[in-house]
């Protein structure tokens, strides 16, 4: 077997994560030609095709490529760990940290994390992977992220969760809505009016099940994956919605009113998800400190699935 270099593994790990030679080159701050050459040399060294180049569709890993990618990520993380270990002697952290964030939590999780690391650990390269809760956790379990921020209902069996904040859905209205003046509202009352709900699973399934247990069916007029769009529609008094703790105004500047739902509403806590049985690195531990600080001191909430 020909010699395998750390550089080849670093570039291949980036290709495996991004599924793109172009994006891998950007991430590693080298040319596309350098990444392509390293990939070809690595394939020659292991004696197998690791990736299939699809015109206009990026890179697809072969079975051999997936196995090598797992080892390449482990080596890359160990190398980054060496740099972090030296930095920790001087109270500094460095290396790359990828955090998966459920997309409706992005506006809440990403800004304070960036702020925290830029102020305290500017040598850390912080990247984010946004998407559906199960998808970003699967990426984490495959080694493409070290930590995820999701809701409790989304937590996968192979992940361990830490509660960052206990949350419950509330009804959100325009002040002009007939139910806005009530101290709390029932699902039966809500069922008489049009709703715009989060178009995320298990969001809709959970919502419909809650209404069914109350013996009613919601009038779901519209769905959206955008919290901002829902806020704007509610602010115009076109529908109510079921979201987390409040935003005072819609992005258009219209006031919003949040009311608790009468009855036993299940909690759906914001969670930090980690791979079960995996030791926490110094970077992950620091990210958890940042998230605990934010959700422990901030009363803003987010849309729940």
Image (cartoon, rainbow, N blue to C red):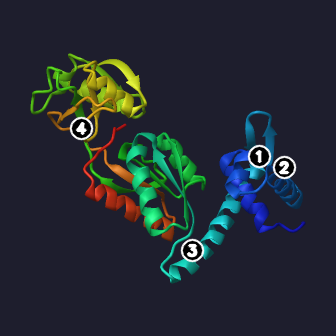
Work out how far the residue at label 4 is from the one at label 1, CA to CA, in angstroms. Answer: 50 Å
Work out how far the residue at label 2 is from the one at label 4, CA to CA, in angstroms. Answer: 55 Å
**Of 289 and 67, the residue lying toward us:** 289
Instruction: Look at mark 1 in the image and give the residue it sits on.
Output: 62
Asked whether disc 2 touches disc 3, contact meaning CB atoms under 8 Å apart, the reply is no
Residue at far bottom of view: 89
The location of residue 224, given as percent across then percent down, is 41, 26
Question: Which quarter of the rendering shows the C terminus?
Answer: top left
Report the side of 109 relative to 71 (left or right): left
Instruction: Look at mark 4 in the image and give the residue it sits on.
Output: 248
Mark 4 secondary-structure assignment = loop
Identify the residue shown where x is 22% and y is 27%: 173
Asked whether disc 1 touches disc 3, contact meaning CB atoms under 8 Å apart, the reply is no
Work out how far the residue at label 4 is from the one at label 3, CA to CA, in angstroms. Answer: 41 Å
Mark 3 secondary-structure assignment = helix
First-in-chain label (2 vs 1): 2
Instruction: Look at mark 2 in the image and give the residue it sits on.
Output: 49
Work out how far the residue at label 2 is from the one at label 1, CA to CA, in angstroms. Answer: 7 Å
Q: Is residue 160 visible?
A: no
Q: Residues within 10 Å of mark 1 (few under 14, many from 20)?
A: some
First-in-chain label (4 vs 1): 1
Q: Is residue 271 above or below residue 132?
A: below
Identify the residue shown where x is 25% and y is 50%: 299
The location of residue 237, given as percent across then percent down, is 25, 20
């Amino acid at each position: 077997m020909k010699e395998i270099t750390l550089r080849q593994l670093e570039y291949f790990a980036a290709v495996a994560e991004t599924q793109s030679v172009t994006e891998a080159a950007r991430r590693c701050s080298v040319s596309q030609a350098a990444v392509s050459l390293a990939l070809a040399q690595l394939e020659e060294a292991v004696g197998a095709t690791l990736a299939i180049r699809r015109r206009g569709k990026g890179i697809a890993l072969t079975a051999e490529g997936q196995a090598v990618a797992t080892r390449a990520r482990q080596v890359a993380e160990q190398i980054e760990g060496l740099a972090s270990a030296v930095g920790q002697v001087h109270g500094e952290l460095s290396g790359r940290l990828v955090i998966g964030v459920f997309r409706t939590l992005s506006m809440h999780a990403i800004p304070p994390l960036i702020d925290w690391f830029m102020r305290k650990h500017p040598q850390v390269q912080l990247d984010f992977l946004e998407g559906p809760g199960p998808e970003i956790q699967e990426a984490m379990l495959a080694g493409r992220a070290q930590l995820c921020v999701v809701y409790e209902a989304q937590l996968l069996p192979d992940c361990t969760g830490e509660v960052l904040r206990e949350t419950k859905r509330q009804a959100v209205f325009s002040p002009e809505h007939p139910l806005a003046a009530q101290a709390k509202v029932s699902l039966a009352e809500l069922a008489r009016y049009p709703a715009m709900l989060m178009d995320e699973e298990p969001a809709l399934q959970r919502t419909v099940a809650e209404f069914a247990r109350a013996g009613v069916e919601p009038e779901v007029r519209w769905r959206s994956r955008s919290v901002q769009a829902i806020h704007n529609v509610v602010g115009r008094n076109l529908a109510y919605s079921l979201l987390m703790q409040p935003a005072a105004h819609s992005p258009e500047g219209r006031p919003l009113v949040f009311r608790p739902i009468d009855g036993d509403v299940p909690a759906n806590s914001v969670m930090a998800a980690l791979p079960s049985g995996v030791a926490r690195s110094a970077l992950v531990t620091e990210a958890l400190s940042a998230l605990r600080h934010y959700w422990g001191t901030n009363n803003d909430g987010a849309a729940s699935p």
